[in-house]
Image (cartoon, rainbow, N blue to C red):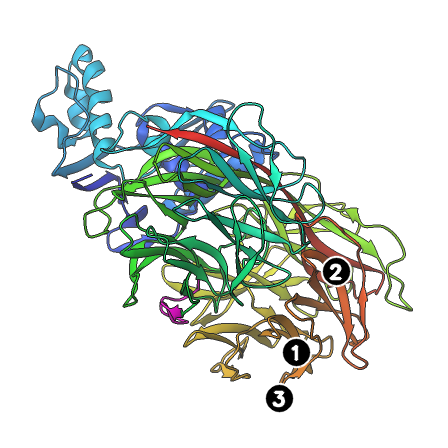
Amino acid sequence: MGGTSAETIRFGEFELDLRAGELRRGTARIRLQEQPFQILLMLLEQPGGVVTREEIRKRLWPNDTVVEFDHSIGTAIKKLRQALDDEAGSPRYIETLPRRGFRLMVPVIQSAAAVGEPAAPPAPAMSPAATVSDSFAARSATPRAVRGRLLPAVFSVVLVCALGWLEWRMLQNRRTPPGETLDVSSLVQVTSSTGLDVDPALSPDGSFLAYSSNQNGNYEIYVKPLSAGSREVQLTADGGQNFQPAWSPDGKLIAYHSQKHGGIWLIPALGGTTRLLSDFGSRPEWSPDGSMIAFQSVDTVDLGVTAFPAMPPSTIWTVTVQGGALKQLTQPGNPAGGHGAPVWSPDGKRIVFSATNTSFSEIWSVEAGGGEPLRTLGNGVLYPVYAPNGRALYYTKIFGPTFLLMRVALSPTGAVAGVPQLIENTGQTLYAHLRFSANGKIATFSRLSAANNLQSVPISTVTGEAVGEPEALTHDTNGRKTGPVFSPDGKTIAYSIFQVGEHFNVWLMDPDGKNNRPADAGQDTPLFQGWFPDSRRIAYIVRANGHNTLESLDVVSGKKEALRELSVANSTMRLSPDGKQIAYNIEQSGAQNIWVVPVDSGPPRQLTFDKDSMTYPCWSPDGKFLAVGVERNGGSQIVLIPSTGGAPIQLTADQGGSNWSHGWSPDGDKIVFAGQRDGVWNIWWVSRRTRQEKQVTHYSNNNTYVRYPTWSPRGNQIVYEYAETTGNIWTMRVK
């Protein structure tokens, strides 16, 4: 696309900037979540018309999402009214039509000025001047016959000019930018295993497919002809948990990452002897001339739908195929986040990659020879890949509760040269690792879905060992259930529900999973931090208008209290057992370290000064220690530090494993953590006194993961997040 657009919709005291996706009143920016935002857009699309509850349901919760629609729609409308300073009893902006839907009550002024490209053709009766602005009053004065043609045409032109706002493509899908695009009507399922098939790569001529699958227990590399009736051939068989195959441009070699053995490996495309190319790194991608491979330095954490491509301190590197000479292209902290999922431009001059952390996901690029990285696309975007002709970029957009497969045009210099186009709204299914054949005729991807719920395992109060099988406490598909924490009296579990692109919402339930309810009548209470000692109040961070406020909520009375402003807001913050401090990690110069800050007032204080990232602090029951994760021994380990500061004591030393702590036993001896061994996640604990480790759960599937275990203060159960990812490989044509 060669043009740019500027567009706003004004109504009452407010202005909606479609391209920036912002709601403003004067100079003030108003915080509005995606679901209320989408409802507002629907109301603006039909000024004076009725937006039905069924229309909202289809827009916000596609596919087979399980959710209480009436309650959730009511919550979203309530949030929208709060943002607009509107009252349900005496509305100025949104009228409720009982059992039908909602209607916008104020005049609407839509403005758009397109430069450099034509908009969609207007209706014959509309003059060019009418495409620039259209007010409610002007429409009211227009004869009915003309209005019938004018209104849809004006709004269509406005939305064409506002292609930066993705919702329009979800409704209209009329315009295709220049160059090739994906033909979503040509989808073909290529694999059909009941487990997980991931990381597809097409041979240069598009006739063969390489991918990773756990169909025989371990993840191995397979190759399958795309001709009808053909069967796959297993390329590796070493039990190395092998992922991310990438086909060389000449079709002779396949590069892949071995999770068990580490690093980047090469194998002949028809099978044969493997060769280690780099003893670290993952996500290999060949340069167009076949002389080099780009990769990320740290492996992807898991195979979950919501897993980011990389976390700090991952950076982008290249290695020569002949000789193995290594070159680091990006540095920790520049840009912020972990750098992952690198992809070469077709001319071999640039490498595009994702920069991600727990709170953001962006797309950047860097010259293939090194240099200053350039930001390409803003927050909520990831997994970029160049179009075969190099004139566009495909990527995934996190939008409300859904994933969107997007395309944006690029200039000859590689800069964004247009506004994004929606290719497909894939709902809560992720089209992962999109790749093209070298001839540009076929695209392939892994279509991933996840089931996510909280589970509980009974524990002996004497030995700390499991005395029964895990049981699910939640039973739905409504987003990710994560971060459970028991109240100090052990009677209530608080946890967060996270839908893709949404903020966290805090919910409560009894230890047996019953009496499940929102902490604040469904209101958004993002970034839950923990319980106060009285077992009535929870702490959380609210982000609004550029400020981060620590607040408390009495879950019995509903009373809220603002406690203090914070300079940072991090989802890994934890409240101390006495309710007086918050511990958190923050990235500086590419490394994360642990800080604490008082709840009432006072400056923050740094506890660790490690060159390796220290994350996810977790208080001991007496508040004297913090269990912390650190990148060591080729993986993430658990260390113990005094809560007043001091030298860390390493408790785990699993070579290449992942160990993420989140809770303590009531006696303050055992730290419970999610641990990955041989590619499989389970719940473990380690004694801080004896350093003995004990496996609590015994999952064996490597397409599942566990997270954030919490130990009941009563000592009789451990509750944790459990997720299972399934998916197969699909292809589609390029047209």
Sequence order check, earlier mark of 2 and 1:
1
Q: Which residue is the site of mark 3? A: 647
Residue sitting at x 18%, y 48%: 412
Task: Give, as a three-letter code, the residue at label 1.
Answer: Val
- Magenta stretch, overall SS: loop
> How dense is the environment of label 2, judged by Cα within 10 Å: few (below 14), some, or many (20 and up)?
many
Residue 587 belongs to the span the image colors magenta: no
Q: Which residue is the site of mark 2? A: 683
User: Which mark identifies residue 708?
Assistant: none
Q: CA distance from mark 3 to mark 1?
A: 10 Å
Q: Which residue is the site of mark 1? A: 639
Task: Give, as a three-letter code, the residue at label 3.
Answer: Ala
Q: Which residues are magenta?
A: 326-339
Camera sees residue 580: yes
Query: In which quadrant of the rendered image does the N terminus lie?
Result: top left
Direction top: furthest residue: 145
Q: Position of residue 346 (x, y in %)?
A: 30, 47
Query: In which quadrant of the rendered image does the C terminus lie?
Result: top left
Locate residue 141: give its quadrant. top left
SS for dot 1: strand
